[in-house]
Amino acid sequence: MGRKHLKAGQCFLICFAGVVIILLSGCATFQGIKGKLAAREYINRSSELVAAGDYQAAIEENQRVLSMGVEGVPKDRAAFNIALIYASNKNPRKDYRKSLRYFKTIVEDYPESPLREQAETWADVMSALQKATVRSKGNNNGENPSNEQITSNLHLLQSQKLFSEGKYQEVLDENSVLLEMPGKSLFRDRALFNMGLVYAHHDNPDKDYAKSLSYFTQLINEYPESPLAVQAAIWQNVLNIIEKAKQVDIEIEQKKKELSR
């Protein structure tokens, strides 16, 4: 009889423990869902605040996401938002140093994030702009880089990344954007040089020496004072020699055909 009571007690304890585990698991799941919904609400609210020009409040909303202890909340997105806010020219408290720090946070703390590549590119841009700002202050200029300068930097860095990956058409697209920007783009000479290189590159399936030559020539004519003009002139000479050699080969082939008649 005592053994039956003992077994019944053990069964009760086991069942009770199972119920507790299930309840705790359910609570954890519920808390996770609740946390994700709250994080989404904070991020959506931050977007509304940015649109309204309340940048500090927008930063605070994203910081609430970063401080959450729930797994699975989009902390990478929150950090990215904060970085962009600190980089914005419209933000009266713009701070490239803080922006750079948050972009680096994404790269270092969230390596699997889909925002990682963008964050890496932006980190390079912010680093360059931070140095440029320091130099401008040293020259008593006092002017901060404009949105156009930031955008130009971004396209340029992205094109360099694509070039290293062999994505030549995408490199052309990025540099074409720089050429089409209103006014004199900060890196227009660099864009022309890049496009010349792409069309001259031996691994480019759409290699075209004539187009390459045209971009290098345009660079020399429009930006004779550019530090890239000297390199462009060298390329111009090389490509002219290649084009002349091709013409000679064509003429030789034509003469061979005439003689064989």
Image: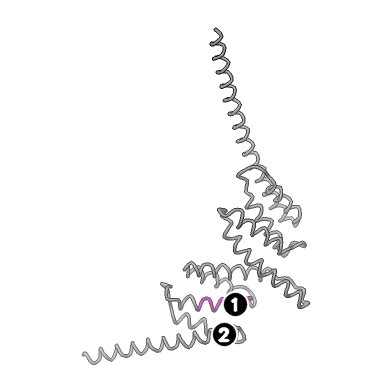
Three-letter code for the amino acid on which mark 2 is drawn? Ala
* Amino acid type of the residue tagged 1 in the rendering: Arg
Q: Position of residue 93 (x, y in %)?
A: 77, 61
| Residue 218 location (% of width, % of height) | 54, 83
The answer to whether 13 appears left or right of 254 in the picture is right
Q: Is residue 242 left or right of residue 99?
A: left
**Looking at the figure, which quarter contains the C terminus?**
bottom left
Residue under the image location 63 percent in, 32 percent down: 27
In this rendering, position of residue 7 left or right of residue 60? left
Tag shown at residue 30: none
Horizontal side of residue 32 vs 162, given as left or right: right
Principal secondary structure, stretch drawn in magenta: helix
In the image, is residue 190 part of the stretch drawn in magenta?
A: yes
The residue sitting at 42% across, 76% down in the picture is 202
Which residue position holds label 2? 229
Single out the mark in the foreground, 1 or 2: 2
Mark 1 sits on what residue? 188
> Tag 1: Cα neighbours inside 10 Å, few (<14), some, or many (≥20)?
many
Mark 1 vs 2, N-terminal side: 1
Question: Dot 2 lies on which element?
Answer: helix
167 or 15, which is in the foreground? 15
User: In what quadrant of the picture does the N terminus appear?
Assistant: top right
Identify the residue at image location x=68%, y=60%. Answer: 101
The answer to whether 153 is drawn above or below residue 40 in the figure is below
Q: Which residues are magenta?
A: 185-196
For the residue labelled by badge 1, is the local secondary structure a helix, a strand or a loop? helix
Q: Is residue 6 above or below residue 186?
A: above
Q: How far, Cα to Cα, is label 1 from label 2?
A: 12 Å
The answer to whether the residue labelled 1 contacts the one labelled 2, judged by CB atoms less than 8 Å apart, is no
Q: Going 48% across and 80% down the picture, which residue do you hit?
A: 212
